[in-house]
C-alpha cells in the first residue's frame, strides 16, 4: 500500500501518525498518508512566514511569478494521467472527471499567470500639492482549507491566485481525499517557487485545521467546505480579525418556464445534479417547473435518473459512488425524512446492493417548506416542485438561507433575464447549468458564504490595498 507524505518547507515529510484513505467504489483501504499534528502545522506556518519575510515571492518582478506559474501549469498537465487515477480511486469520481480536475488546475495556473503582472493600483488626484497612489500588496501567509469533493481543482483555484499575488500558502487537505493533492503539489514544486511558498498538510480539521486558522502567522483564511465548519472558523477568525474568504454550501434552484427547451433542460439536469454523484456545492438540487409543463418535465427527469448506471469511477460511469459510508447513510436518512414529511420519492432513494457507497439517482417531489427542499443533501438527489406564476417561482428559488448559484430555463430573453436579475446568488445560469468557467467570478451570498474565487476578481481576494500619499514640498 502506498504511503503519501506532507510537504513542509520544501521537504516531503512523514509524521508520527497516519490516516487511511478508502476507495469509495469498493469500501476498501486504498492508501495511507502522514497525519500532520500541531507541531507539523507550526513548522509549515513558520516556513511560510519566513518566505513572506524574505520577500522571495513578493519582492521579485511580478513577471517572475508569471514564469513560475506557467511552469507549474505545464508540470500539472504532465502528471494529469497518473494523478487522475489516484483521484478516481481515493474519491470515487470518474476517471474522465478526475483528469478534467487536473486540467482545470493547470488552467488556473495559466490564467493567474496572466494576471500576476497586472495587479495595478490607481493614482488618486488630490490637487497640485500631493501625489497619491494605491498599491495592492499580498496578505502574507494564506491558510487554505480544502474540501474532498474537488480537492485538486479547488486547491488550484485558491493556490494559483494567492501565489500570483505574492502570498505564501499553507494548505490543509481533506482527510477523506488528500492523495491527488500531493501529486498536484509535487508537480507545482518543480516550477521553482521559493522555499516555504507552498506547504501542504493532511490532518484532522478539528485540530490541525483549527490550529492553522488560529495561528498568529495566519494573515488570511480561504475556506471551502460546509456551512457548519465555516461558521466555526469565522468565530476563530474573529479572535484575530483575520480576513476570510468563505466558499460554503448551497441549495441552488433552477426555474423552468413553460417555453423551456426540454432537451436543453435535461442535459443541464444531468450535469447539474448527477455529475460527481451530486457532490457539488453548486449542484442543481431543486428544479422549479411551471405547471403547464410540469408533468412532461417530471417524466423526463425521472426517465433520465432511471437511465443512469452506477459503476466504479475507473469505468467512467454516469453515476459514481459518494465519498463515504457516513455520507451515504446521511443521504439515505434525508430521503427517509422527506418521505416522513409526505414527499414523493419518484425514483431511486436507495443504496445499490454490493460493494461501494452508491446511492441511486433520486428524484423527489416535495413542497418548499420540507427539509429536503431547504437543506443541502450533497448527493444525487433532485427535488422538483411546480409553480404557477413567475413571482412564485422567484419566491421559492430565493426561499432558502443559501445563495450560491441559480438557473433560469426558457426561450424568452426578457423573461429569463428579468428573473435572473431577481435571483439570490453569486452566479445565475441561463439555459445551461454551469455556464461559465474559471474565468467567471464565483461565490455566494447568505449561508453560501462571501468573497469571490475564479476570474479576475478573485485576485483581489488575495491582496490588500495600501494607499501612499506624498505631500510635495513647496518652493
Ligand atoms: P467540511 O466542512 O466537513 O470540511 C472542509 C475542510 O475543513 C476539511 O479539510 C476539514 O478537515 C476542515 N475542517 C473541519 N473542521 C475545521 C476547523 N474547525 N478548522 C479548520 N478546518 C476544519 O466540508 P466537506 O464535507 O469536506 O465538503 C463538503 C461541503 O463543502 C459542502 O457543504 C459543499 O457545499 C461545500 N463546498 C463548497 C464549495 C464552494 O466553492 N462554495 C466547493 C466545494 C464544496
Image (cartoon, rainbow, N blue to C red):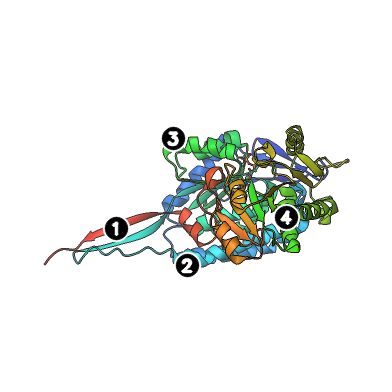
How far apart, in angstroms, are the residues tagged by discs 3 and 4?
Answer: 53 Å
Image quadrant holding the C terminus, namely bottom left
Ligand 1 image position (quadrant): top right
Looking at marks 4 and 2 on the same chain, the residue that comes earlier in the sequence is marked by 2
Looking at marks 3 and 4 on the same chain, the residue that comes earlier in the sequence is marked by 3
Q: Which residue is mark 2?
A: 63
Q: Residue at x 44, y 50 (%)?
A: 140
Name the front one of labels 1 and 4: 4
Q: Residue at x 61, y 54 (%)?
A: 390
- Residue 39 shows up from this direction: no
Q: Which residue is mark 4?
A: 292
Which residue is at the far left? 475
Quick check: 195 left or right of 396? left
Looking at marks 3 and 1 on the same chain, the residue that comes earlier in the sequence is marked by 3
Task: State the count of labels.
Answer: 4
Residue 388 percent across, percent down from the top left: 66, 51
Looking at marks 1 and 4 on the same chain, the residue that comes earlier in the sequence is marked by 4
Determine whether label 4 and label 2 are within 8 Å by CB.
Answer: no
Name the front one of labels 2 and 1: 1
Residue 252 vs residue 354, the one in the foreground: 252
Q: Which residue is mark 3?
A: 239
Determine whether label 3 and label 1 are within 8 Å by CB.
Answer: no
Q: Secondary structure at mark 2?
A: helix
Q: Which residue is mark 1?
A: 468
Amino acid at each position: 500500500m502506498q504511503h503519501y507524505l506532507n510537504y513542509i518547507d520544501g521537504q516531503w515529510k512523514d509524521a508520527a501518525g497516519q490516516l487511511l484513505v478508502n476507495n469509495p467504489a469498493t469500501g476498501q483501504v486504498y492508501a495511507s498518508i502522514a497525519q500532520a499534528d500541531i507541531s507539523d502545522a507550526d513548522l509549515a506556518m513558520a516556513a511560510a512566514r519566513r518566505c513572506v519575510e524574505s520577500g522571495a515571492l513578493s519582492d521579485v518582478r511580478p513577471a517572475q511569478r508569471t514564469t513560475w506559474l506557467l511552469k507549474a501549469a505545464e508540470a500539472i498537465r504532465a502528471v494529469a494521467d497518473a494523478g487522475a487515477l489516484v483521484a478516481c480511486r481515493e474519491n470515487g469520481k470518474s476517471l474522465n472527471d478526475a483528469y478534467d480536475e487536473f486540467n482545470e488546475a493547470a488552467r488556473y495556473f495559466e490564467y493567474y499567470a496572466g494576471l500576476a503582472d497586472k495587479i495595478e493600483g490607481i493614482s488618486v488626484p488630490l490637487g497640485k500639492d500631493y501625489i497619491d497612489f494605491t498599491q495592492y500588496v499580498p496578505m502574507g501567509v494564506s491558510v487554505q482549507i480544502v474540501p474532498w469533493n474537488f480537492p485538486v481543482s479547488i486547491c488550484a483555484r485558491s493556490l494559483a491566485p494567492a501565489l500570483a499575488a505574492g502570498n505564501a500558502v499553507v494548505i490543509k487537505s481533506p482527510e477523506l481525499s488528500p492523495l491527488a493533492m500531493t501529486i498536484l503539489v509535487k508537480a507545482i514544486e518543480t516550477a521553482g517557487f521559493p522555499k516555504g511558498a507552498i506547504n501542504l498538510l493532511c490532518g484532522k480539521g478539528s485540530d490541525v485545521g483549527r490550529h492553522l486558522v488560529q495561528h498568529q502567522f495566519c494573515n488570511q483564511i480561504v475556506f471551502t467546505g460546509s456551512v457548519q465548519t465555516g461558521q466555526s472558523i469565522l468565530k476563530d477568525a474573529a479572535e484575530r480579525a483575520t480576513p476570510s474568504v468563505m466558499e460554503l454550501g448551497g441549495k441552488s434552484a433552477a426555474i423552468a418556464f413553460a417555453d423551456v427547451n426540454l432537451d436543453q433542460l435535461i442535459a443541464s439536469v444531468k450535469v447539474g445534479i448527477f455529475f460527481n454523484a451530486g457532490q457539488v456545492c453548486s449542484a442543481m438540487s431543486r428544479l422549479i417547473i411551471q405547471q403547464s409543463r410540469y408533468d412532461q418535465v417530471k417524466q423526463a427527469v425521472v426517465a433520465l435518473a432511471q437511465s443512469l448506471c452506477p459503476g466504479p469511477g475507473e469505468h467512467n460511469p454516469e453515476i459514481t459512488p459518494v465519498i463515504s459510508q457516513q455520507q451515504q447513510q446521511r443521504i439515505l436518512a434525508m430521503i427517509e425524512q422527506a418521505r416522513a414529511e409526505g414527499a414523493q420519492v419518484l425514483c431511486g432513494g436507495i443504496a445499490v446492493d454490493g460493494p461501494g457507497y452508491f446511492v441511486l439517482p433520486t428524484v423527489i417531489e416535495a413542497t418548499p417548506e420540507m427539509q429536503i427542499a431547504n437543506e443541502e443533501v450533497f448527493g444525487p438527489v433532485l427535488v422538483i416542485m411546480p409553480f404557477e406564476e413567475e413571482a412564485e417561482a422567484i419566491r421559492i428559488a430565493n426561499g432558502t438561507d443559501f445563495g450560491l448559484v441559480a438557473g433560469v430555463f426558457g426561450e424568452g430573453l426578457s423573461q429569463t433575464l428579468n428573473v435572473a436579475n431577481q435571483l439570490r446568488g453569486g452566479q445565475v445560469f441561463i439555459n445551461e447549468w454551469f455556464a461559465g468557467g474559471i474565468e467567471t467570478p464565483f461565490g455566494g451570498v447568505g449561508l453560501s458564504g462571501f468573497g469571490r474565487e475564479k476570474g479576475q476578481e478573485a485576485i483581489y481576494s488575495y491582496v490588500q490595498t495600501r494607499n501612499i500619499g506624498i505631500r510635495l514640498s513647496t518652493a
